[in-house]
């Protein structure tokens, strides 16, 4: 479940969200399993955010920053993400991640870690 306080910041829009991120740089946005379908996230600063299992299907995020975001298992079906940045983002097991990687070559699809014998 996502952190409800973080969801409330998100609902207040891009200006509020980005100011909150600047004021709380050590806070990792917890958007785990969040239902973020069909929303607009243009210019949002999602750097380092945890989207584990979240659903961004049908969302739009023009010029959003996903650098170092943890998007493992995130759904990106039909998401529109032009000019978003994905430096060192973990897109492993994300559905729709191949589309993200083709269009945004700076994205990194981290391989699942294997346990040692």
Image (cartoon, rainbow, N blue to C red):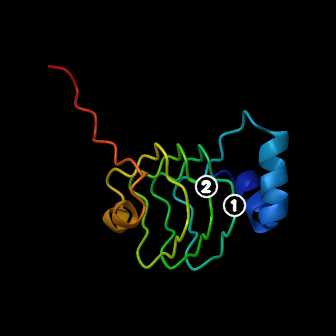
Tell me residue 39's x, y (percent): 63, 76
Residue 7 is left or right of residue 111, and the answer is right
Q: Quadrant of residue 62?
A: bottom right
Tag 1 residue? 44
- Mark number, residue 65: 2
Q: Residue at position x 14%, y 19% from top?
A: 117
- Gap in angstroms between the C-alphas marked 1 and 2: 6 Å
Image coords of residue 99 (percent x, y): 35, 68
The quarter in which the N terminus is drawn is bottom right
Q: 114 or 67: which is nearer to us?
A: 67
- Residue at 62%, 61% (x, y): give it: 64
Q: Residue at x 69, y 64 (%)?
A: 43
Residue at disc 1, secondary structure: loop
Q: Which residue appears farthest toward the left when viewing the image?
A: 117
Farthest top residue in view: 117
x, y percent for residue 61: 60, 69
Residue at image location 51% in from the left, 69% down from the top: 56
Q: Are marks 1 and 2 in contact (CB under 8 Å)?
A: yes
The answer to which of 57 and 82 lies nearer the viewer is 82
**SS at badge 2:** loop
């Amino acid at each position: 479940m996502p952190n409800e306080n973080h969801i409330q910041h998100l609902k207040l829009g891009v200006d509020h969200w980005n100011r909150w991120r600047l004021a709380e740089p050590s806070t990792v946005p917890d958007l785990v399993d969040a239902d973020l379908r069909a929303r607009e996230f243009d210019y949002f600063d999602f750097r380092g955010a945890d989207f584990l299992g979240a659903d961004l299907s049908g969302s739009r995020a023009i010029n959003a920053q996903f650098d170092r975001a943890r998007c493992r298992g995130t759904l990106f079906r039909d998401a529109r993400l032009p000019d978003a940045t994905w430096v060192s983002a973990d897109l492993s097991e994300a559905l729709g991640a191949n589309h993200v990687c083709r269009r945004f070559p700076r994205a990194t699809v981290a391989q699942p870690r294997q346990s040692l014998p």
